[in-house]
Image: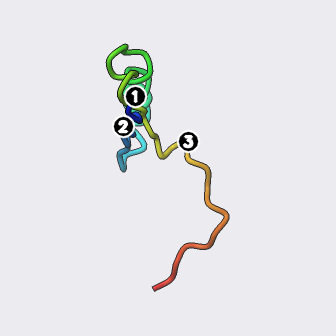
Amino acid sequence: MRAKLQVFVSSVQKELEDERLIVQNLMNTDPFLSAYCAPVLYDFAPASPQKATEE
C-alpha cells in the first residue's frame, strides 16, 4: 500500500480556524479520504527549538 498523501490545511486568517478543523474532521472520517490522505494542520505543529535563520 502506498503512503498516504499529506494534505496541508492552512489559512492566514484566525477567523477560519473552525473551517480548518471541519476539513480535518472530514478527511479523518470520510472512508475514501482517510484511506488515501492525512491532514496536516499547522495549528498543531510543535514549535521548533531552533532559532529562525537570519538573512
Question: In the rendered image, which residue does mark 1 sit on?
Answer: 1
Identify the amino acid type marked 1.
Met
Disc 3 marks which amino acid?
Phe
1 or 2: mark nearer the eye:
1
Instruction: Name which residue type carries label 2.
Output: Leu
Residue beneath the point at 51% across and 43% down: 43
Mark 2 Cα shell of 10 Å, populated few (<14), some (14-19), many (≥20): some
Quarter of the image where the C terminus is located: bottom left
Q: Secondary structure at mark 3?
A: helix
Which percent across, then down, holds residue 33? 34, 22
Q: How many marks?
A: 3
> Does 16 sit above or below residue 50?
above
Quadrant housing residue 18: top left
Question: Marks 2 and 3: CB-CB under 8 Å?
Answer: no
Q: Estimate the spatial distance between the alpha carbons at disc 1 and disc 2, rounded to whole Å.
A: 12 Å
Q: Residue at x 35, y 27 (%)?
A: 36
Res. 5 mark: 2
**Badge 3 density bin: few <14, some 14–19, many ≥20, Cα 10 Å:** few
Task: Point out the frontmost of discs 1 and 3.
Answer: 1
Residue 40 sits in quarter: top left
Of callouts 2 and 3, which one flags the residue occurring earlier in the amino acid sequence?
Answer: 2
**Residue identified by numbered label 3:** 44
